[in-house]
Image (spheres, helix red, strand yellow):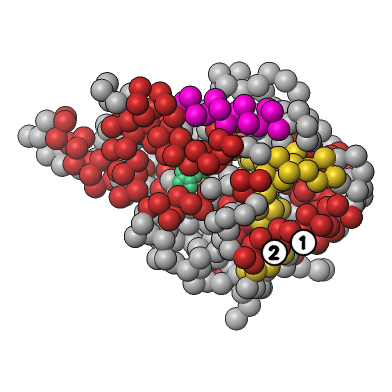
Amino acid sequence: MTDVTRMTAAQVAGLISSGDASAVEVATAHLDRIAAVDERVHAFLHVDRDGALAAARAVDEKRAQGEELGPLAGVPVAVKDVIATRGIPTTAASKILEGWKPPYDATVVERLRAAGTVMLGKTNMDEFAMGSSTEYSAYGPTNNPWDLGRIPGGSGGGSAASLAAYEAPLAIGTDTGGSIRQPGAVTGTVGAKPTYGGTSRYGLIAFSSSLDTPGPCARNVEDAALLHSVIAGHDVRDSTSIPQPVPDVVAAARLGATGDLTGVKLGLVKEFAGEGAEPGVLAAFRESVEALVKLGAEVVEVSCPHFEYALPAYYLIAPSEASSNLARFDGVRYGLRVGDDGNRSLEEVMSLTRDAGFGPEVKRRIILGTYALSSGYYDAYYGQAQKVRTLITRDFTTAFESVDVLISPTTPFVAFPFGSRTSDPYQMYLADLYTIPTNLYGGPAISVPCGLSEGLPVGFQVMAPTMADDRMYRVAAALESAVGTLTPPTLEA
Ligand code: GLN
C-alpha cells in the first residue's frame, strides 16, 4: 500500500470508506511516523496513542456495521495545546498549567470526535499563544521541517510543523493575530482563520477573547475546507458565536480548483505591497498575482490607510484582554501552586506561583495590558486602540464595496533562524504585520503556499468579508491549482 502519511485527508477518508485501509492502519502509520521523526521536529507536547487507536477502532466498527461515515471519518488530526481536551493534558505550553487535564472537551474537539476524526495528540505553541515562532513554549521550541534550525512560525508552530513533517494530515490552530496563517506560510502549508464567531471559542484557553478564532490547518486547500466545515457553526455555549449557517467552503474550494476566476475582483492592499517585505517574498507574491490574472481574475489596487496602525492597536487590545483573562491562573484553581507551606498568605502563594509559572513574554503582556487598562491611562491607550480598530474595520468594509477579496503576502519574511528575533520583541511582533488587521476586523483570511524564496516557503494571504469564508477558499484553491502545493523535505535519515 502507498504510504498513507503522504496522502491528503480527502484521499485517506476515501481509503477508509472504501475499505482499502482501516482507520487503525491509518492511525498506526501516523503514530509510527511521529515516533520516527518527532524527536527532531518536536511538534507534539503530548501524543495520545491509546486514545487515537480507540477512536480509530470505533470508526472501523461503525463501518463494519454498515453505518454511514462522515467525510473525515478515520482521518488523524493534531490539536493545538491551547484547546481543552477531556482527560488529556492541556497546558497552553505553559508551566502554570503543567499536569492539568480538563474535565471537558472544547466545542471544536467535540465536533472533531463526532465527525469520527482521530485525535493524535496536542501540539506545541508559544506560551498562551503569545508569539510568532514557538520559541516561547515553556517546553522548548518546534523545529521547522524545511530547515530544523529555523522557526516553524507561531504561535501554532507545532500544528503547522506536524503537517509539514507528515505526522498528521490535518491540524487545528487558533488565530488571534496570525497564529494559524503565519505558521502555515513559513512551513509551506495551508492555514485558515475563519470569520470571528464562525467557530466556537468554548473550551479555548482565552488569550484575547475579542480576537481568538479556532481554525483549520492542512496541506492543501480542499482539506482545510473539509476540516473547516466539520468544526464551524453556531454554538450556544459561546455568546459571540454567529447563529447563521456556515458558508459552503468545500464547494467553494472545489470550484476554485477548476482554475477559473473569471469575474472575481482581487484588491491588492497598497500599504502591504511594498515596504517591509523581503525581496524574495515580494517576487513570489507578484508571480502569484500574475498567475491569478491568467485565471481570469481582475486585480485592482486598494488603499487601506489605517492598516499601518493595526500593529500598535493590536498590541494594546490583545495584552489588555490577556491581562484580564490570565488573572484566573492564581495557583488555586488549576495546575501549578508554589510556596503553599501553610504559613504564606494567599496573595504570597499567588505571586510566587505566577512568577514561577509564566514565561517572560506572558509577563510582558500582562504588565502592558494592566498598564493600558489602568484608570489614568484607559482612554489614552485602550480606548484609543478601540477607536483605531473601528477605523481599520471601515477600511475593510469600504474596500469590499469594490473588490471581492483582499490579497497580500502572509508574512514579510520567510522562516527565520532560532534566536534571531527573541532579543527584541518588536522584531517578533513584525511577523504579524499583514495578518493582524483581519483579526481586528473579524473577517476570515487564509494563507496558501505560493512558492519559495531562498529555498523556504512563502505564503499568500486572501482576506474576505465577514461570513464570506467561501470566497477566500475559492481564490486560494485557484492559486493552488496554478502554482501547486509544496513538498517539504522528508526528514528521512
Ligand atoms: N503573534 C501574535 C502575538 O504574539 C499573534 C498570536 C496569535 O495569533 N495567537 O500575539
Furthest residue in direction bottom, as rendered: 493
From the image, tell me which residue sits under label 1.
Answer: 287
Looking at the rendered structure, which numbered label has been put on residue 283?
A: 2
Relative depth, front residue between 1 and 489? 489
Q: In this picture, is 165 found above or below 490? A: above
Relative depth, front residue between 355 and 261? 261
* Contact flag, marks 2 and 1 (Cβ < 8 Å): yes
Q: Say whether residue 220 is magenta.
A: no
Q: Position of residue 59 (x, y in %)?
A: 74, 44
Left or right, 361 with respect to 15, comes to left
The type of residue carrying mark 1 is: Glu
Furthest residue in direction left, as rendered: 343
Relative depth, front residue between 157 and 69? 157
Real-space CA distance between mark 2 and mark 1, rounded to the nearest whole angstrom: 6 Å
Q: Position of residue 205 (x, y in %)?
A: 46, 35
Q: Classify 10 Å Cα crowding around label 2: few (below 14), some (14-19), many (20 and above).
A: some
Q: Characterize the magenta stretch by its predominant secondary structure.
A: helix
Q: What stretch is highlighted in magenta?
A: 386-399
Q: In which quarter of the image is the N terminus?
A: bottom right
Q: Where is residue 230 in the image (x, y as percent from the top left)?
A: 72, 36
Residue 376: quadrant of the picture: top left
Dot 1 lies on which element? Answer: helix
Q: In which quarter of the image is the C terminus?
A: bottom right
